Amino acid sequence: MTLEDLRVFVAVASERSFSRAARKLRRTQPAISQAIRRLEDGSGERLIDRGSRDGRLTDAGGVLFDYATRLLTLADEASDAVGALRDLRTGRVAIASNEGGVYAVLPVLEAFARKHPPLRVDVRRMPARQIAQDVLLRTVDFGILTFNPAEKDLLSLVLATDELVLLVSPSHPLATRTEITMEEMGRQAVIAHNDPSPARERVLRLFGERHAPLNICISLPSMDGIKRAVEAGLGVALLPRRCAERELAGGQLVGVRVPDLRTPRHIRFVYRRTGDLSHAAQAFLDVTRALVAERARRRGTAGAP
């Protein structure tokens, strides 16, 4: 049984006439008769009582009619659902990022939401060391990393640049300084993120190599919590500048450079070199590429004589 033959059968049963069904479906009457014959041969049952004047269904025909209408409804719904994905009326994009990377992808989310408001974006918090493999395994569509992945099957776009900065409250003694040494930072009460990351490991390694003490007095699970603790005067914190742009601009926090720990870094949007993307994911990649290209164009214009 094919869906097309079932569609013919439902039309004949609904119209109570081979000829009317043929006109409705824009088919010839012999083609309608052949479709019904194929269904009857396949089921081994008469479906339409040829002796009745109104094309009445047999018992078998009544049973098939119920199932056929349901199957055709499901087929139409499936076609509509696939069409909605193709037309970007529905769909979802999954992105893996650690907490710091979220701040860099926010402008892309804003541009994507303006262009494709029906589509959903799911940003999942994930340790940086796990993100590349999850992109390759198609657990997520994209990833946000602060380093160029070594995997040859991944490509990346630079979303933004960032650097680590020491955040202090405006009333802190260091708030009047523009920069300090690692050793001076180590003598402060430091509020740290307790989620492992390459940046955290690098900072700890640098302090260890210098045999310099690092007084971590509070560990918190979120950057927002860390910023609020610094504002409250509980200590200082070394965080990516991009994560505190609003507080730095508003004066709630002050940024102090620690030259040996700044290390400007690129925040990268990572995607698979090959492999099909969903329509929604392809649209997100297109928006990201356009945003990155526009930023490059503006930088080029700003630097032109």
Image: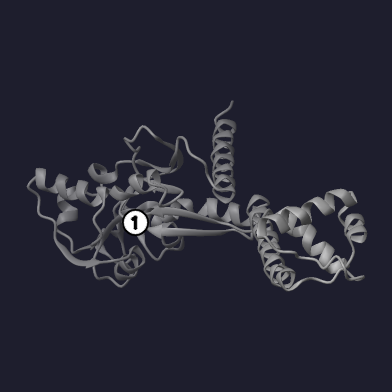
| Image position of 225 (left or right of 300) | left
| Residue 251 location (% of width, % of height) | 42, 63
Residue 151 higher or lower than 27, as above or below = above
Mark 1 = which residue? 126
Residue 294 higher or lower than 98, as above or below = above
Quadrant in the picture for residue 14? bottom right
Residue 270 higher or lower than 46, as above or below = above
| Image position of 301 (left or right of 202) | right
- Residue at the far front: name it: 51
Q: Quadrant of the C terminus?
A: top right
Query: What amino acid is at disc 1?
Result: Met
At 18% from the left edge and 64% from the top edge, which residue is drawn?
189
Secondary structure found at label 1: loop
In-front residue for pair 58/234? 58
At 45% from the left edge and 51% from the top edge, which residue is drawn?
104
At 27% from the left edge and 60% from the top edge, which residue is drawn?
237
In-front residue for pair 37/161? 37
* Residue 188 in sight in this render: yes
